[in-house]
Image (tube, helix red, strand yellow):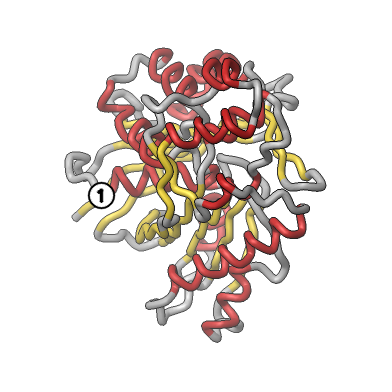
Amino acid sequence: MYLADFQIVKPSNPISQERILEWMGEVHVGSKERIEKICCKPKDIKQRLLVDASMLDQPDLGNFGHRAQKFHLVADKVFDELYVDQTLPPEHLIHVTCTGYRSPSAAQLQVVKRGWEKKTLVTHAYHMGCSAAMPAIRMGQGFASMSQGVVDVVHTEFCSLHLNPELNTDDQLIAESLFADGFIKYSITKGRPKRGFRILSMHEEMLPASSEAMKWECEAWGLKMTLSREIPGLVYRAITPFLERLEAKSECSLAGAHFAIHPGGPKIVDLIGRKMNLSEDQLKMSWKILKERGNISSATLPHIWEALLEDSTYKDGSLVVGIAFGPGLCISSILLEKVCT
């Protein structure tokens, strides 16, 4: 199976990290020292892309229903842009998101708009955290194995929708300094593409005694993030045997592979790099996407893959280890081989 045909829709409002940290200091009165101590610095994140820049000046503090409606309007426009020139329907369409819900979904409505009701099956991969690309790809491989057509995966992550300046906790401060918005589409096919990635292996585990470390819970106002300070340490201790099991499963050495690490925060990338003795070049794209985009939840890892695919310095046959993290606490991985003929 292969990943190919990556297509990005960029949110239209780039906001510098300096401006966001200033805003946080203004709305979280008396929290300047905490913000300076625990939040992501401009050296790690230069800017983030937001759907609506006015969220900083006049944050929508309406209830969850109001936020869900706004998510649906944005997701609907994203699907319109992604499929505006596509005439051939995918056999399957997997919609991935952690940041909003509506039924029928934007994916289903797109199928209706295109007149594909009898040709495209829609599956939802919702609320599965920042590692949600992995279960979506597992689903897609199963669908593709039983079909002759293409399986599309679309991520719509509107993280800034869940800003809440009235919630003055460490978790909220970290989330506000880290998360951004992102939208991406790619396809899973059985046929080798001219440019893409061959899927070699996948592996996933939940770490023992970690269920309280990461949460993404529904509240009356919106979605609330819980991020334990223990997460980097949990990952640091687990990553070596975890990657050994991925290596054994794939029967392929990871030595010299490039790493696409979901930047749940700068410390995660740094610790994995040090634990696995990875070079600056092996981690380059993980740092690049964090710096240019921030953490865009489940859409982050596909953005790193797209950047690796577009960079000609990564040659045909290059190995890429994708690693992401989600509630559970779950570590999920994929081993890819770049193809470009």
Identify whether 27 is placed above or below 240. below
- Is residue 19 rendered to the left or right of residue 100? left
Residue appearing at x 49%, y 36% in the figure: 20
Q: Which residue is mark 1?
A: 310
x%, y% of residue 65?
77, 58
Residue appearing at x 55%, y 80% in the figure: 119
- Locate residue 122: give its quadrant: bottom right
Residue appearing at x 54%, y 42% in the figure: 297
- Residue type (three-letter) at the residue carrying disc 1: Glu
Q: How many marks?
A: 1
Identify whether 266 is placed above or below 5. above
Identify whether 319 is placed above or below 135. above
x%, y% of residue 284?
30, 30
Quadrant of the image for the N terminus?
A: bottom left
Quadrant of the image for the C terminus?
A: bottom left
Question: Among all residues in the image, which is located at the extreme bottom?
Answer: 115
- Is residue 50 rendered to the left or right of residue 192? right
Q: Is residue 329 visible?
A: no
Label 1 packing within 10 angstroms: few (<14), some (14-19), many (20+)? few
Q: Is residue 194 visible?
A: yes
Q: Nearer the viewer, residue 71 or 307?
A: 71
x%, y% of residue 221?
77, 47
Which SS class for mark 1? helix
Residue appearing at x 44%, y 70% in the figure: 81
- Locate residue 273: give its quadrant: top left
x%, y% of residue 42?
40, 28
